[in-house]
Amino acid sequence: MTVHKIKLRDLDEKFIQDLRDKLGDEDIELEIRVSAGHGECAGQEMNEDLFWKTIEKFDWEKEGDDRAVMEPAIRFLSQCSIKNIKFFHDILSEKLYVLDGERYARQTGSNAYSENGSFSVDVFLYARCCVIANGREYYQHVLQDPTEMPKDLTFEAILNLPAFAFELKTGLEFVHVPSKNYETFFNTEGWNEPTPRII
């Protein structure tokens, strides 16, 4: 019996043709197993510590190229199980959701929320992303003191981290609805007005 271990993205026409050339018209049995993960993620469930350990992999020496900054984290997360990649996405969404509130939105610099000024819901989301990208300690500081929110700084790219890791692992598109809707104004408890006015 011959066993071939191959990433799904490499299961292309050339691979199938090679099998045809070797085996002709023989009947074969194809078994698909999804790897449970390897490396530092093996045997671990995604939790707070593993989430922040992934974020710690960011390489800020590559600042200016967001994908390059995240590359070590993408590789690390891609070694986790598919289940853990989805859990990572859930934790990310929950942390963004917690920061979705007026007291944080009022502290973001030129895009700061005010009743009469202009306010971009997207820029506020990307500012919240920047908080998480800067690690656990900074995230905790901001939760305790909203004035620590980054001023005119964003890191939208982190939203794609789980998708990049999933793609690297499987060669497939990442389709997963996270546990919380992190879009601005969805955490109604974080806003004083029941339905904040968008300008």
Image (cartoon, rainbow, N blue to C red):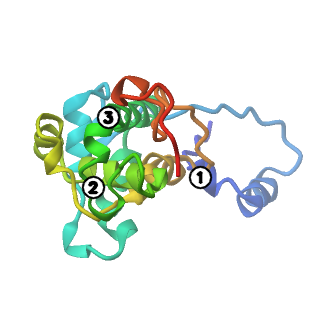
Badge 1 marks a residue whose secondary structure is loop
Picture layout, residue 157 above or below residue 129: below
For this rendering, which residue is in front, 28 or 85?
A: 85
- Residue drawn 37% across the image and 23% down it: 189
Question: Residue 155 at x, y = what percent?
Answer: 35, 60
Q: Are marks 2 and 1 in contact (CB under 8 Å)?
A: no
Amino acid at dot 2? Thr
Residue at image mark 2? 108
Label 2, label 3: how many angstroms apart (C-alpha)? 17 Å
Left or right: residue 92 compared with residue 62: right
- Of the 4 image quadrants, the one containing the N terminus is top right
How crowded is the residue under tag 2: few (<14 C-alpha within 10 Å), some, or many (20+)?
Answer: many
Please name whichever residue, 19 or 178, is drawn nearer the observer in this view of the structure. 178
Taking 177 as reference, is 151 above or below it?
below
Q: Which residue is mark 3?
A: 95
Residue at numbered disc 1: 171
- Closer-to-camera residue (148/167): 148
Disc 2 vs disc 3: which is toward the camera?
A: 2
Residue that appears at 46% across and 41% down: 184
- Which residue occupies the extreme front position in the image? 116
Crowding around mark 1 (Cα neighbors within 10 Å: few <14, some 14 to 19, many 20+) is: some
Q: Position of residue 92 (x, y in %)?
A: 36, 38
- How far is disc 3 from disc 1 in space, using C-alphas? 27 Å
